[in-house]
Image (cartoon, rainbow, N blue to C red):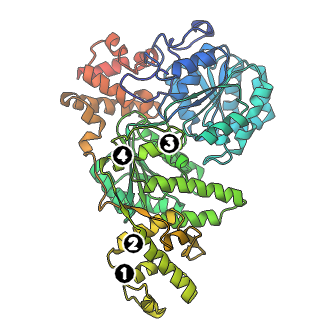
Amino acid sequence: MLTPRGSQREPAPAIGGGPVGSRRDRPPHGRRAAGSPRVFGYDSFRGDQQEIVDHVCGGGDALVLMPTGGGKSLCYQIPALVRDGVGVVVSPLIALMQDQVDALRALGVRAGFLNSTQTPDERRATEAAFLGGELDLLYLAPERLRVPSTLSLLDRGRIALFAIDEAHCVAQWGHDFRPDYLTLSQLHERWPDVPRIALTATATEATHAEIAQRLDLGGAKHFVASFDRPNIQYRIVPKNEPRRQLLDLLHTEHAGDAGIVYCLSRRSVEQTAEFLVAQGITALPYHAGLDAQTRARNQARFLREDGLVMVATIAFGMGIDKPDVRFVAHLDLPKSVEGYYQETGRAGRDGLPSTAWLAYGLADVVQQRKMIDESDGDLAHRRRLAQHLDAMLALCETVECRRVQLLAYFGQSGASPCGNCDTCLTPPESWDGTVAAQKVLSTVFRLDRERGQRFGAGQIIDILVGKRTAKVEQFGHDALTVFGVGTELGEREWRGVLRQLTARGLLAVEGAYQTFALTDASRGVLRGEQQVMLRRDPERQTRSRSRSARTPQAELPAEAAPLFERLRAWRGAAAKEHGVPAYVIFHDATLREIATRVPATLAELGSVSGVGENKLAKYGEQVLAVLAE
């Protein structure tokens, strides 16, 4: 696909053939669309992009699995511009359609959308443009295809292709299931001669197969790129006052950076945002309990302002096209590896170093197990949820390279250790925890069998370390034979043992009070038939990179940094004037190249990666004026 030189970030793009006017301006059907960088400002494809573009331009169906920032959009935008008709893009992201369309229009691409946010007059104008051949791309929410008038409209126009974005939403066992996506198989039934391309950044082998089956893409050509995001550093730390840990991360590594903080509950979102604001960090909340106007306003600020932190539930983030998100932090455990990968993938879309940071503890395991037990659905559904959680817990507890394990989950085995995750940079120790595990399990056994009692982690740990609390003495637990048998470990270490035993299914969490019970798997450990190797948690969070090594400015020559900042300031003012996010004007990667090369003429500026013909005409003189200062 067409990509910026020196960057792994996809723009919000168009064809490599000039600002698109009439159809006669375009290359004939089947001719390669990447020969000129006049629209996108990029001069080469990357990976499978060219093969995908050629295949879809020729009328073939395609299923594309490509990581966030890998350039999926160009795989349908270029064919839409080459083929006769309008490319119809099915996207679940109503709140972002305006920004997607604005980004395309900034490139000279004629784009529009139809969704429930428009007035009747706006809808009629877009429909007229579609029927009049005045659009290159039309964005639709999937629910629009259940409306007869929308189907009738599409019947009366000429469709170049259907692009189904975020195709994993069709997977009923997935983390972002959208029922409306199940109806999209009708596209092939109603318009059998129109090519379809389904795209997603998140799919295991099972989800991949489900997408193909549910969208009737059995005959499509499948393209699977590597899921590796080498610029993202994955770090998982033991949870200990997570908001303070987060604050430390922001102050020491990401001061002034844009980022996303994910929390499990709405209440936690609100409290965390308030905490950050009180610490002098510009932060906003986002969750489904806020009214639509507040959500839209906060999202718009996040997209348009530099250095803002969004604290959100997983309701926020899909399709967010902000390239300079420098960190994604999780204060609670994600429910699945798919969800974790998709959420962390919102960092570093521009290819620059970014951080995926997760604080994880025993309470997360207990809470997630409890949520599964109480979830709606049959036994098979709960079992599937448990499988998702087990895979996530295995990623958290591994002593091996996290990236290797993450890629293996998505079917890409055989990767070498990355050297850029916490377990590679500071390898954790593993230790024989069989005796420690037996002490924990024996305590749970004696509480249950001898006293008919079950307790949570705090009481179990107090018994093990021999702590005579009022509660211990009240229940006579200081008389148990296991009282004080665990003084070789501290409370923090015992909490880690409990967490790992629960993660492995050697302990179960039951009831409203989240008490511990033995499982069938516990017996082998108690009898000495099974060894238990445990991960030793590091004493403190590893800071493997200094702030200066992580910032975009650090990649600039020292003399270019002030000019880069002036260009960013100009871009911010221009974005505000035009009412669009700053990255729609130019990406940081483009501004860095301009600051480094300091072009003196429009022709020289036009040779910079990311400066297409339309943007050169619109902003070229302004950029040269900034450089002349």
Q: Which quadrant holds residue 562? A: top left
- Left or right position of 626 against 340: left
Which residue carries the number 3 mark? 408
Amino acid type, callout 1:
Val
Distance Cα–Cα, label 3 vs label 1 = 39 Å
Distance from Cα at disc 1 to Cα at disc 2: 9 Å
**Which residue occupies 54% across, 27% down?**
73
Q: CA distance from mark 4 to mark 3?
A: 15 Å
| Tag 1 secondary structure | helix
**Looking at the rendered structure, which numbered label has been put on residue 465?**
1
Q: Which residue is mark 4?
A: 421
Q: Cα distance, mark 2 to mark 3?
A: 30 Å
Residue 592 percent across, percent down from the top left: 30, 27
> What residue did someone put label 2 on?
494
Q: Nearer the viewer, residue 313 or 237?
A: 237
Q: Nearer the viewer, mark 4 or mark 2?
A: 2
For marks 4 and 2 on the same chain, the one whose residue lies earlier in the sequence: 4
Whether residue 193 sits left or right of residue 555 in the image: it is: right
The dot on residue 282 is none
- Name the residue at the left extreme: 559
Q: Earlier in the sequence, mark 4 or mark 3?
A: 3
| Distance Cα–Cα, label 4 vs label 2 | 26 Å
Question: Would you call the spot at circle 2 few (<14 residues within 10 Å), some (14-19), or many (20 or more)?
Answer: many
**Nearer to me, 102 or 474:** 474
Image quadrant assignment for residue 367? bottom right
Residue at 37 percent of width and 40 percent of height: 418
Dots 1, 2 in contact, CB < 8 A: yes
